[in-house]
């Protein structure tokens, strides 16, 4: 009897360890993931006072809210705790002082870690970092693999960086199409060998790493031409033939439906639209929950980024095909409908034109600012194709409503922005809107005292019409309030 009990206990322990080494199914949940733990320092290694995390939602409105950041203070005993509404199992980029690493968290589950900063400085991150809770073994393997240099995502990230910088061709045995694909194939096999030859890693990470390797190889295929600068292609006929060969390679890659593997859902987010729709001829099977998240993101992208509410037909599709996420999508549509109606009813967005006698003026900035004398102005130069510009409109929306009686908001776009897109977007963006010719825009650039090579460009103007400050880029709402607060006093 005693022997039987011991055998059962050992089996349960083995089952527990075995189950812990498998990734959970990709699924959506409203329950937040929890990340907590303890940071250990000493007199020589000062313990940071906070833990910071960056992660991405698996579906979002397409207006910059996919990327989330969270932080927690570290108490006197080194403990911290973070609640993360991730939506799905997702990788988190954790920063503790100068130490950075990646781990995965799961909705409704707790992931914990202990970080010994003294050990990290002397023995490396793998020895210093110990995981507990859900996915403990998997996260330990992930940190180990990254530190050993055979994490596929890190390796391909380096390949992508070389491609972007025009350096990849130098590493190809042949500076042509065949040389590029030989390089990809050899990279793929080299990574699999690294994964197979290291027996310290467990089954869950091994499965994940091989799936990530397969995905990353496929994701790099469409970039052949950019990697080799279309070596040897000089005519339209040669380019068409090249595109045909590329499609054939990608169709062969997709023959075994590699993305039906649920593990790939952890690493391939967002790629079906750009990879499959553009390059692959046959339909692609995707796991059900992943498909739902992908479809939800398309609807939210339409509402958030394009400012187009759902049609009745689309609402029916949401109810039919999104049994879990549908309510969230429809609620977002209702909020957008109320918000757009509010902006319109309050007359908070106007299309403006310059007086005829100032359209060719060399002092176009004064002509734009003249109607607003007596109150400060925030002038911004933007274009409909600029992502940060669109994020800025979204992030500043509530603040603009709050400050509408204290300052004017004036937005300038140019002929570079498609007219129909501009006309559709601006009713949703608080402020007065001007659309300039390229000649007018160039004249305006000469009168703004900052680098105007790119957008967004901001000009903070005092109530007497003089420029307080001009600068470029979007650094977030807090930075913007620091810039405009002096002129509001």
Image: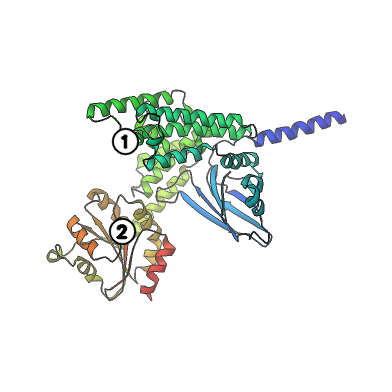
In the rendered image of this protein, does residue 385 appear above or below residue 236?
below
Left or right of residue 47, residue 253 in this image:
left
Cα gap from disc 1 to disc 2, whole angstroms: 49 Å
Mark 2: which secondary structure?
helix
Q: Nearer the viewer, residue 164 or 310?
A: 164
Q: Quadrant of residue 71?
A: bottom right
Left or right of residue 355, residue 86 in this image:
right
In the rendered image of this protein, does residue 198 appear above or below residue 80?
above
Q: Nearer the viewer, mark 1 or mark 2?
A: 1
Residue 232 image position (x, y, % from top left): 28, 29
Give the number of marks: 2
Q: Residue at x 32, y 57 (%)?
A: 456
Q: Which residue is mark 2?
A: 344
In the rendered image of this protein, does residue 370 appear above or below residue 175?
below
Q: Nearer the viewer, residue 450 or 352?
A: 450
Q: Which residue is mark 1?
A: 229
Q: Residue at x 36, y 24 (%)?
A: 248
């Amino acid at each position: 009897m005693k022997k039987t009990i011991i055998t059962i206990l050992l089996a349960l322990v083995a089952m527990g360890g075995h189950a812990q080494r498998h990734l959970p199914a990709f699924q959506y949940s409203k329950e937040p993931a929890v990340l907590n733990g303890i940071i250990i320092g000493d007199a020589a290694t000062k313990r940071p006072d906070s833990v910071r995390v960056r992660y991405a939602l698996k579906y979002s409105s397409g207006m910059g809210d996919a990327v989330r950041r969270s932080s927690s203070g570290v108490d006197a005993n080194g403990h911290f705790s973070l609640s993360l509404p991730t939506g799905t199992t997702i990788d988190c980029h954790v920063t503790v002082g100068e130490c950075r690493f990646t781990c995965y968290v799961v909705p409704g589950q707790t992931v914990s870690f202990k970080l010994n900063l003294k050990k990290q400085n002397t023995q490396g991150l793998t020895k210093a970092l110990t995981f507990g809770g859900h996915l403990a073994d998997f996260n330990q393997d992930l940190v180990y693999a990254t530190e050993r240099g055979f994490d596929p995502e890190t390796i391909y990230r380096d390949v992508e960086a070389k491609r972007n910088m025009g350096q990849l061709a130098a590493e190809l045995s042949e500076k042509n199409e065949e040389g590029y694909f030989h390089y990809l194939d050899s990279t793929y096999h080299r990574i699999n060998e690294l994964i197979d030859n290291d027996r310290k890693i467990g089954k869950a990470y091994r499965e994940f790493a091989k799936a990530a390797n397969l995905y990353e190889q496929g994701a790099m295929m469409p970039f052949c031409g950019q990697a080799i600068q279309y070596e040897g292609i000089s005519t339209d006929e040669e380019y068409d033939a090249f595109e045909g060969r590329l499609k054939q390679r990608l169709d062969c890659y997709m023959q075994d439906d590699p993305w039906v593997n649920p593990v790939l859902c952890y690493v391939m987010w967002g790629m079906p639209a750009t990879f499959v729709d553009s390059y692959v001829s046959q339909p692609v099977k995707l796991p059900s929950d992943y498909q739902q998240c992908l479809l939800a993101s398309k609807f939210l992208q339409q509402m958030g980024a394009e400012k187009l509410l759902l049609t009745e037909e689309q609402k029916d599709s949401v109810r039919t095909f999104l049994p879990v996420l549908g309510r969230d999508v429809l609620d977002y549509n209702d909020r957008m409908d109320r918000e757009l109606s509010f902006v319109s009813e309050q007359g908070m967005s106007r299309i403006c034109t310059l007086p005829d006698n100032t359209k060719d003026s060399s002092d176009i900035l004064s002509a734009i600012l003249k109607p607003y004398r007596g109150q400060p102005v925030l002038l911004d130069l933007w274009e409909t194709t600029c992502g940060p510009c669109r994020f800025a409109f979204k992030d500043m929306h509530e603040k603009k409503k709050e400050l509408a009686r204290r300052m004017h908001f004036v937005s300038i776009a140019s002929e570079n922005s498609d007219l129909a897109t501009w006309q559709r977007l601006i009713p949703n963006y608080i402020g007065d809107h001007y659309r300039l010719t390229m000649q007018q825009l160039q004249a305006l650039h000469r009168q703004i005292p900052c680098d105007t090579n790119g957008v967004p460009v901001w000009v903070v103007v005092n109530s007497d019409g003089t420029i307080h400050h001009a600068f470029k880029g979007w650094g977030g709402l807090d930075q913007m309030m620091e810039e405009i607060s002096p002129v509001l006093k």
